[in-house]
Amino acid sequence: MITLQNVSKDYPTSAGPRRILSNINLTIEPGQHVGILGRNGAGKSTLVRLISGAEPPTLGTIERTMSVSWPLAFSGGVHSGLTGTDNVRFICRIYGVDFQPRLEFVKEFSELGIYMNEPVVTYSSGMRARLAFAISMTIDFDCYLIDEVLAVGDARFRERCRVELFEKRKDKAMLIVSHSHRYLQGTCDRFLLFREGSIEEYDDFREVYFQYKELLGEGFASREQMMHEMKQANG
Amino acid sequence: MLNSDAFSGALLRASPLTITRRVIGALVLRELLTRYGRNNIGFLWLFVEPMLFTLVITAFWAATRTIHGSDIPIVAFALTGYSSLIMWRNMGNRCIDALRSNLPLLYHRQVRVIDVYLSRLTLEFMAASTSFVTLALALYAMQWIPAPENALQVAGGWFLLAWFGAGLGLILGGLSEKSQVVGKLWPPFSYLLMPLSGVAFIADALPPKLQQIVLWLPMLNALEYLREGWFGSAMHAHYDIPYVVVFNLVMMLVGLSLVRQVGINTGEE
């Protein structure tokens, strides 16, 4: 379980501290899939960073009784001066797990071939994303943080990521940040909408999406109108 | 297709000590690889580099017979002085901006801010110690320096210097995250400290007034203690070990507190 109690987060700016998240209360149970929507800069990624533990909250407490992943496919976690193989080795060392089977898996999944032994700095952004995602899959967490993950790679790679994550790991808790309604609709059973530093919770995707679009200033005339347009987009 | 389902048993809930040990080990190896790579002699450079520095200085002093005001064999004098300097200076320098370049590491729940500094300090300590011991053995084998009169005291002085270096590193590391100015101001300031910390003199050779002033420096006290352990019968050492211990303790506490503040304030990427 992950519990956030009265969590606020400020960032310093030249005009004084700016409150990005304000008094957030949230509990994530094992196995729950939580979708996160909100405008750019609304604090979605900040929440991910707080839950991952990369940053402490300014106020409030965060309690974790589940193991939490780093944000998936997060290329910042890959050291660009090291080779792909050395990056895998590093992750295995920190988490204290066997290196050899995981190297095999990363090699196969990322399809990087001989590039595994070249410095990451020589990779294309697609290769980097493939490596980062594959490395993310080598450690078994209770809760995965997913920040716009499916923005990486080509269609075939995205499909393989989907299988790896949402089929093989569907019992794990997940926190998913995405702008894509198709992506969230099928996967999540809870939704959080960020509005001016606080969050609103919804169980129904249609309702959260309607509110979200309105927030963006692209609101639908009615809920029926929205359903109609989504159906068309999916069809 | 290999299966990722079986990847479990990660040390996600191991004891804090086990995790810290693993993380620091991994960070040290990572730092070695990024700094020296796998080319030519690879991470042997870690201690070959300080060894070369020390050798050049030693050779220069031995050739020019630089006056250092005592009967101490010049090679032993240069070796102890320069090795000590390299250790505390590098420990300090390497901690500056250490976190700034490693922020993404904090996304891993296992890695704490202090681990980044501890790994750098460990690495520099290993480098300087290996260089010191290797050179001492080599020079002793060639009969250029005598064996230490009291090896335990030499080790004691060395650890006091390392402790000082660790405190210095934590302080500089913590301050450098607060303000970039620290990284700019420290190098010139360290150039002021270097000649005063006993690299090229022993305290006894100084005029009493100057001696009183420079003995406020804990590095000089520790170095005097170390040198007395090596060739005490050839010199009159001046030091105050309780003073060094208290000084180191205070630095350590200030450093740890600064690093803790860094942990609270990180993350405006």
Image (tube, rainbow, N blue to C red):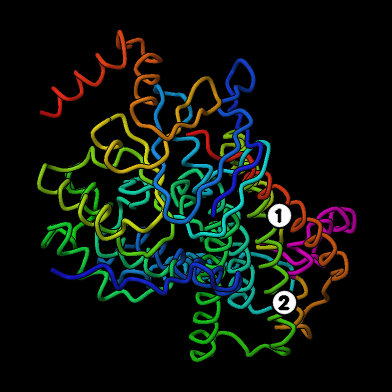
Amino acid found under the numbered disc labelled 2: Arg
Q: Is residue B59 visible?
A: no
Q: Quadrant of residue B118?
A: bottom right
Q: Specify the segment rendered in magenta.
A: B200-223
> Where B228 falls versus B150 (above or below)?
above
Amino acid found under the numbered disc labelled 1: Leu
Q: Quadrant of residue A131?
A: bottom left
* Residue A216: image tag: none
Residue at 47%, 71% in the rendered image: B11
Residue B206 is covered by the magenta coloring: yes
Main structural element of the magenta stretch: helix, strand or loop?
Answer: helix
Residue lying furthest front: A224
* Residue B227: image tag: 2
Q: Are marks 2 and 1 in contact (CB under 8 Å)?
A: no
Q: Pointer 1 indicates a residue of which chain?
A: B
Q: How many marks?
A: 2
Q: Which residue is mark 1?
A: B256
| Mark 2 to mark 1 CA distance (whole Å) | 30 Å
Residue A166 is covered by the magenta coloring: no
Dot 2 crowding, Cα within 10 Å, few <14, some 14–19, many 20+: many
> Where A188 falls versus B90 (above or below)?
above
Question: Which part of the image, by quadrant, shows the N terminus of chain B?
Answer: bottom left
Q: Nearer the viewer, residue B27 or A151?
A: A151
